[in-house]
Image: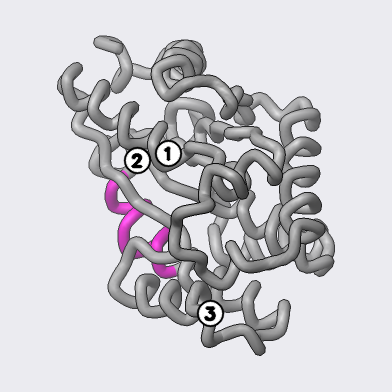
């Protein structure tokens, strides 16, 4: 967790993560929020999971390649955590120390939803691996872009389907329900975005949630 939400932490920057099922519009939200922040002089740093580093991108290719259809759930989780550990140490920690605003397309909560619930490995098991990969780091704010999987699938009808996109609807329903549980958990860092809304309205919702952080990096927001 960075300085904005935990005064005992030495990081000067902000880590903002974006989560949601396939087709929930989080990538569009990141792009629009980045444009807004840049116009305000904030110059955010955009990362993604899995990936974000040279090593992580190679892992991403393995994870999402439809040719990896024989991958077992445990391997999937360990590869996700390997990419995450590299991203945290190579990119996120230095950027936070430099006082940057990071916008990360998926992060540790994705493994809770996809591997913990979707694959049935269990939330507690995934959280133990997350703790190891993160080394105590936690986002300052996590946007949960909630959209039922049937609607998300319709949005992605024309998109090239990666290995996870090709999973059965029951898998994506479990992922969606896991994100709903996060939204109802009462944890302050979770902020729900109505993903069925137009992109401009999703941006408006996100900006309203950012302002409540009252962080110095956002003073011109």
- Disc on res. 102: 2
Depth order, front residue of 206/100: 206
Determine which quarter of the picture holds residue 126. Answer: bottom right
Determine which quarter of the picture holds residue 116. Answer: bottom right
Please give the residue where the numbered disc 3 appears in the rendered image.
Answer: 66
In the rendering, at what x and y percent does residue 205 appear? 50, 15
SS assignment at label 3: helix
Marks 2 and 3, how far apart at CA: 30 Å
Say whether residue 39 is left or right of residue 13. left
Q: What residue is shown at x 63% (from left), y 61% (from top)?
A: 130
* Closer to viewer: mark 2 or mark 3: 3
Which quadrant holds the C terminus?
top left
Marks 3 and 1, how far apart at CA: 31 Å
Q: What residue is shown at x 78% (from left), y 50% (from top)?
A: 173
In the rendering, at what x and y percent does residue 111 appear? 65, 59
* Closer to viewer: mark 3 or mark 1: 3
SS assignment at label 1: strand
CB atoms of marks 2 and 1 within 8 Å: yes
Depth order, front residue of 126/197: 197
Please give the residue where the numbered disc 1 appears in the rendered image.
Answer: 15
Q: Which residues are magenta?
A: 86-95
Secondary structure character of the magenta stretch overall? helix
In the rendering, at what x and y percent does residue 46 appear? 30, 45
């Amino acid at each position: 967790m960075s300085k904005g939400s935990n005064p005992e932490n030495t990081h000067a920057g902000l880590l903002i993560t974006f989560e949601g099922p396939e087709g929930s519009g989080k990538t569009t939200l990141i792009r629009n929020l980045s444009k807004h922040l840049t116009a305000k002089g904030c110059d955010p740093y955009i990362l993604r999971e899995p990936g974000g580093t040279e090593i992580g991108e190679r892992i991403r290719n393995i994870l999402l390649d439809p040719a990896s259809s024989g991958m077992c759930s445990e391997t999937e989780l360990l590869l996700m955590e390997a990419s995450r550990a590299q991203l945290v140490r190579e990119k996120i920690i230095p950027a936070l120390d430099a006082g940057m605003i990071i916008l990360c397309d998926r992060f540790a909560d994705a493994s809770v939803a996809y591997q913990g619930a979707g694959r049935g490995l269990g939330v507690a098991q995934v959280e133990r691996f997350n703790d190891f990969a993160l080394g105590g780091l936690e986002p300052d704010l996590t946007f949960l872009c909630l959209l039922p999987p049937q609607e998300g699938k319709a949005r992605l009808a024309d998109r090239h389907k990666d290995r996870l996109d090709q999973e059965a609807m029951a898998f994506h329903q479990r992922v969606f329900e896991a994100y709903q549980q996060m939204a109802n958990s009462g944890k302050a860092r979770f902020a729900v975005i109505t993903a069925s809304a137009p992109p401009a309205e999703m941006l408006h919702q996100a900006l309203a949630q950012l302002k409540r952080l009252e962080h110095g990096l956002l003073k011109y927001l």
